[in-house]
Amino acid sequence: MQQDKELVKQALEGSEIAYEKLMERYYDSIYVMVLQLVKNMTDAQEIAQDTFTKAFSKLLQYNEQYAFSSWLFGIASNASIDFLRKKKYIEISFDDEDKDLKNAEASESPTPNPEEHLIQKQSLKALRAKIEDLKEHYRKLLELRYFEEYTYEEISEELSLPMGTVKTQLHRAKNQLMKSIKEQR
């Protein structure tokens, strides 16, 4: 968490490397969460990219008292919910021959309503269930990296593995998770 705060500080000072590191650190987990919600890889990629665009444009609004990852996941969740609402509205409005899309604009609320909160909880629960189905070693790597927010260095120390091995196995774990998600669809 401290590393995230330092990267945010550097990003606010104009460091493109800090932006890249933050995106590299969280893109995969944001993408997986969004994919669970929207069930479409292309839409998930677009929403994940939009999440980072929104986050970086509103970086001054980030409160350091909270985990950066929580703030980022909130943005991704809200973007996904907005996407689903608009998609649902568009499908309904075309069926009803109602072409007025002004009503399709979802209100952007900083705090999720009960429905959004439930969707977030269900998505996280579904993601955790998929992770639980992985081999124990892969599960441990993903939990350390994304739920406990360990750095690669900290994972290397925790599991007594070389850094390269941690990166390779974490990549394999993410691939296994994505394969599992795709098979579910």
Image (tube, rainbow, N blue to C red):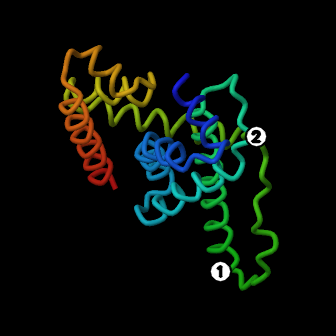
Amino acid on which the number 2 mark rests in the picture: Gln
Amino acid type indicated by mark 1 = Asp
- In the image, residue 97 above or below residue 109: below
Residue located at (45% from left, 25% from top): 149
Which badge, 2 or 1, comes first in the chain's sequence? 2
Give the foreground label among 2 and 1: 2
- Quadrant position of residue 7: top right
Dot 1: element: helix
Q: Which residue is mark 2?
A: 61
Q: Residue 134: where, in percent of width, then height? A: 24, 32
The residue drawn where x is 23% and y is 43% is 176
- Label 2 sits on a secondary structure element that is helix
**Circle 1 sits on which residue?**
95
Q: CA distance from mark 2 to mark 1?
A: 40 Å
Residue at screen point 40% across, 61% down: 41
Quadrant for residue 159, please give it. top left
On the picture, is 40 further left or further right than 139? right
Quadrant where the C terminus lies? bottom left
Percent coordinates x, y for residue 14 in the rendering: 63, 48
The picture places residue 6, in percent across and down from the top left corner, at 58, 29
